[in-house]
Image (tube, rainbow, N blue to C red):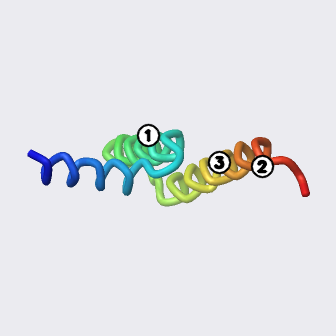
Amino acid sequence: MTRIRAFGRFWYDFVVGDDWRVALGVVVALGLTAILANANVPTWWLLPLLIAAILAGSVWRAARRRPAG
């Protein structure tokens, strides 16, 4: 059981990492892209746009948390 727990912790740390919001945002972006692509909507532009927005939000939150200097 210890190896299974260690394996699960590895994958949690690998996928979620330091910010669960980024992981959740990527899952939502992939799901939304899949749903729209399945409906025959051209979605080639959607995933890069959403990931860029998620990254910008993450950098903005990190910049607000840390003092300048």
Q: Position of residue 46 (x, y in %)?
A: 53, 52
Q: Quick one: 25 or 32, which is closer to the camera? A: 25
Q: Amino acid at mark 1?
A: Val
* Residue occupying image coordinates x 75% and y 42%: 65
Query: Closer to us: mark 2 or mark 1?
Result: 2
Q: How many residues crowd around disc 1 within 10 Å: few (fewer than 14), some, or many (20 or more)?
A: few
Q: Amino acid at mark 3?
A: Ser
Which element is circle 3 on? Answer: helix
- The tag earlier along the polypeptide, 2 or 1, is 1
Which element is circle 2 on? Answer: helix
Q: CA distance from mark 2 to mark 1?
A: 24 Å
Q: How many residues crowd around disc 2 within 10 Å: few (fewer than 14), some, or many (20 or more)?
A: few
Indicate the quadrant where residue 51 lies. Answer: bottom right
- Which residue is denoted by mark 1 in the rendering? 28
Question: Is residue 14 shown left or right of residue 17?
Answer: left
* Residue occupying image coordinates x 44% and y 40%: 28
Question: Is residue 64 shown left or right of residue 23?
Answer: right
Q: Amino acid at mark 2?
A: Ala
- Which residue in the rendered view is the most extreme toward the front? 2
- Which residue is denoted by mark 2 in the rendering? 63
Q: CA distance from mark 1 to mark 3?
A: 15 Å
- Which residue is denoted by mark 3 in the rendering? 58
